[in-house]
Amino acid sequence: MRLERDVISRLAYVAFAAMLVAAMPMLVSAGTSGPSPIPPPPNWQLSTTVTTLCRGIENSVPIKVTNPGADNMTSLQLGLVASRNIYTVGNGTVTTSTVPANGSVTIDLPIYVSLNTSNLVSAGVTVNYNYLTLYSDSEERNVSFSVETCPSPLQVKTNQVITSGEIENITLNLTDVANTTLSDISLQMSIPSTDAAILTTQPTDISSLAPGSSTTVSLRTFVFSSASQTFPLNVSAQFYESSKPVQILDTFPTLSTGTINMTASSITFSPTTLTPGSIFSVSFILTDTGTAGASAVTVTPLPPSGISVYGSNSVFVGDMSTDSQEPVTVTLEASPTASGSYVVPMVVSYINSIRQKINTTIDVPIAFSTALPSNALVGNGTHTYVSGNSATGYRVYSRSGSDLPVVIVAIIVVVAILAALYMKRRAVAERMKKWHTGRK
């Protein structure tokens, strides 16, 4: 019995070992069955020949995809990872068909760079494609660019001096300096709110500009009297160059000067009655009624024909502040033929706060007396004799001395003449009497 049990145990062990040996192929087969492993994607490369992008425009960047592998890359699609300062226009992707094995394809990717982008930017380019028919892959590669401000196809110019305290028309001159038509131009201007207020409705739209053509846009602006002497004038424009969007921003340093308004009041003459051939002075009070002072103020008379400057050609007044008053006196000489009314321009020259030399004119009316003066005007021991008339002109003579000797001499001369005439007449009467007596 014991022997039988040993034999049975050995047989059972052999049977179990045989079962294990029989099952080994199945276990090995089960370990290697199931889906095949995914083949690796091609080791492709991405590059570009562009190293610099322009601010404010859509840049066309050629992206080259090189496939060094043995299989084609199909359904290739490029895109840009958008950021605040760099992005694509439209749907943001560009698609091509195939990058052949051991070949390459170049695709133009439109990249727009905003105006406030820094001088260096890194852009993420996404690449999606299929390979080996059944497999796909998506990767992102970074490309770095330098950024600069490039010449604009739209040239903007403006007058850069405006007067504070007044409504000013700021004129913008726009010129298409490109070889293509610029369309859908939208123009907008900004000034610091502490210096001025823009009165023109914005933005201003222009349909198109042909190559080489120009146009002007006027913007009404009120510049505060308290405006800074220099402040920025910002002009932004958005437009299309062909189908490519462009945005520009120009900043013009603008000079602001206050209003200087020179006026003359209290005009007087010395002597008060002006006569032809006389020397006389014109006096007045010069006042700056504007909002800013002036320096190196000078008054220069420009008299018309018949009147000339006597002495210095100009009067230096000096610096004048707002609402200040300065007396001015100029001396003139009238020709003997001067008569009637004249207007004498007084040119007031000065330098404003931005060192500009400005000239303004004040007209002073002058009238000469046309009545014939007395031939003997006596006073203070001076005798003035006037000959001529208003048609031929007056000639003035004068001498000094006492009035009494002249009167006495005149009386003596008259008496002597009358006595001589009386004596002569009496002698003639005596001769006539003797002649009549002799005849009888």
Image (spheres, grey):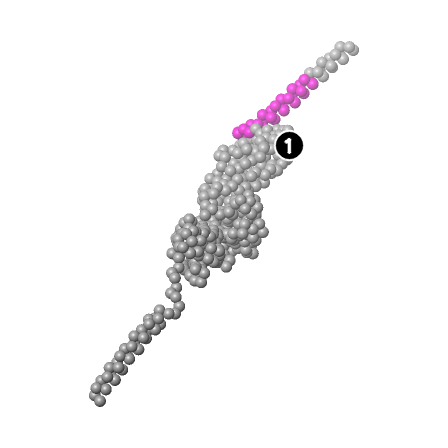
Q: Residue furthest bottom?
A: 1
Left or right of residue 238, residue 431 in this image: right
Is residue 416 on the magenta stretch?
yes
Q: Position of residue 143 (x, y in %)?
A: 40, 54
**Highlighted range, magenta:** 398-426
Instruction: Report the amino acid beneath label 1.
Output: Ser
Which sits in the foreground, 227 or 235? 235
At x 39%, y 64%, the residue is: 38
Horizontal placement of 200 versus 151: left or right? right
To which residue does mark 1 refer? 390
Q: Position of residue 245 (x, y in %)?
A: 51, 53
* Residue at the spot 51% in from the left edge and 41% down from the top edge: 359
Q: Is residue 157 above or below residue 334?
A: below
Which residue is nearer to you in this view: 331 or 38?
A: 38
**Quadrant showing the C terminus:** top right
Can I make out residue 233 in this image? no
The answer to whether residue 77 is magenta is no
SS at circle 1: loop
Q: Say which residue appears at 44% left-offset and 53% top-offset.
A: 100
Q: At which x and y percent is residue 384?
A: 57, 31
Q: Residue at left 77%, top 10%?
A: 439
